[in-house]
Amino acid sequence: MTIIIGIKLPDKIYNAVELQKILTKFNCIIRMRIGINNSTIFCSDKGIILLQVENSDSAINLEKELLEINGIELQRMIF
């Protein structure tokens, strides 16, 4: 099973440090990470990150911690 977590960031600059700490904490379950600017403006303060993660209880814990960041939205795809 493949799990993709989509993270929508309303303010990359404000949330970047906290987000990076969480992603570093869970780096062993993250197989792939892709960042996408959510604007036609270069270096927009909004963005989307896609993570491919291992199917584990840690993936659920990762989502819980990410949702504690103010303003972040998550979506999950399972294949």
Image (spheres, rainbow, N blue to C red):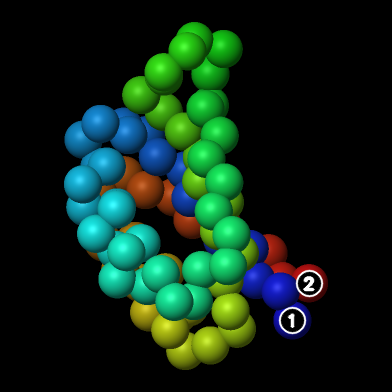
Above or below — where is 67 with respect to 50? below
Which residue is at 53% across, 88% downward?
56
Q: Is residue 65 above or below residue 21?
A: below
Q: In the image shown, does 20 or 38 lie closer to the viewer? A: 20
> Is the residue marked by circle 2 packed among few (<14), some (14-19), or many (20+) residues within 10 Å?
few
Residue position marked by numbered label 1 in the rendering? 1
Is 29 left, or right, of 32 in this rendering?
Answer: left
Q: Residue furthest right?
A: 79
Q: Which quadrant of the rendered structure holds the N terminus? A: bottom right
- The image shows residue 39, relative to residue 59, as above or below, that is above
Query: Which mark identifies residue 65?
Result: none
Q: Which residue lies furthest to the top in this view?
A: 41
Task: Assign a secondary structure to mark 1.
Answer: loop
- Residue for badge 2: 79
Q: Is residue 7 visible?
A: yes
Q: Nearer the viewer, residue 56 or 75?
A: 56
| Local SS, label 2 | loop
